[in-house]
Amino acid sequence: MDRRSFIESCTAGAACLSFPLGGIAGDAHPREYQRAVLVDEHGQPIKASKLTPLTNYVFHYPFVATPVFLIDLGKAVAPHVVSTKDRGAYQWPGGVGARKSIVAYSAICAHKLVYPTKDVSFISFRKTRAQKGVQDELIHCCAEHSQYDPARGAQVLSGPAPQPLATVLLAYDAKHDTLTAHGTLGNEVFDEFFRKYEAKLSLDVGPKAHERVTQATVTELSRFCRNSIQC
């Protein structure tokens, strides 16, 4: 990937421009997927300024079956150097939106690939500390208590997860106050996810599980999932 392509893929944060490309490790290069506008349940583009801070939203990207957490952290979050499982590093571009406070991450836990379904979710963003939490405002997976910091590129805080959650790159349109997903950054687990849950996804989603998303519907996790486990 040349420098121009890398810069264009980092529309979520201008700080990407200052990061030396030679420091990007392995498969932590930005990956461009199809662009998908984030919309509400009526198909209208969501307004970034209308997101409730510290609330767990979910949408699916880049595939129909792969969930993503969308969170307005309520404060500006600066770029951060994130470590990978192969001891490399990449520059996470920080938050987007008018206040640089909005982030998005793959909602598939990097340890055992736990993810939110309509029936149950063992992984979620927590506004306040869980019983086994190390701090407030973290992403916690109850499967084996992996914890990620959404304000620092979903870096692993504690637990057995070997790597951060993959970032979903968002472009912010200030004129229209809208968000568009356009790629990922970090170590993806999509191949492993589809292999592990092939039978379940075929029942839950059907043959469209692998299809690319061109419009992503955003829903509060509390409405998307019947039972969000708190541990």
Image: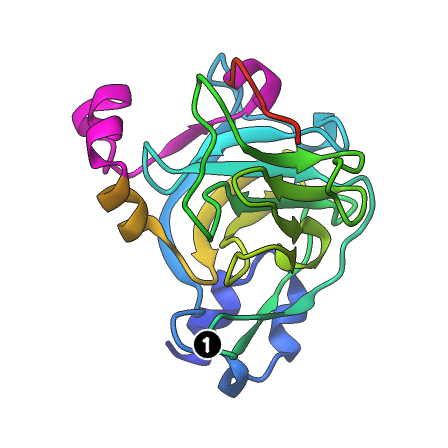
Residue 176 lies, with reference to residue 156, above or below; the image says above
Q: How many marks?
A: 1
Q: Secondary structure at mark 1?
A: loop
Quadrant where the N terminus lies?
bottom left
Relative to 219, is 103 above or below?
below
Identify the image quadrant of residue 75. Answer: top right
Q: Quadrant of residue 90?
A: bottom right
Q: Nearer the viewer, residue 18 or 65?
A: 65
Instruction: Say whether residue 221 is magenta.
Output: yes
- The amino acid beneath tag 1 is Asp
- Residue 106, position as x, y percentages in the image: 48, 45
State the image coordinates of residue 207 (x, y, percent, origin top left). 16, 27
Would residue 178 be seen by someone viewing this image from the given angle?
A: no
- Tell whether position 9 is magenta: no
Which residue is most to the bottom? 22
Camera-nearest residue between 201 and 54: 201
Residue 183, percent across and down? 43, 53
Q: Residue at x 54, y 57 (%)?
A: 160
User: What is the quadrant of residue 35 in the picture?
Assistant: top left
Whole-percent x, y for residue 26 in the image: 40, 77
Quarter of the image with the C terminus is top right
Camera-side residue: 4 or 27?
27
Q: Start and end of the magenta stretch?
A: 197-224
Nearer to me, 68 or 41: 68
Is residue 188 found left or right of 8 in the rendered image? left
Q: Which residue is mark 1?
A: 86
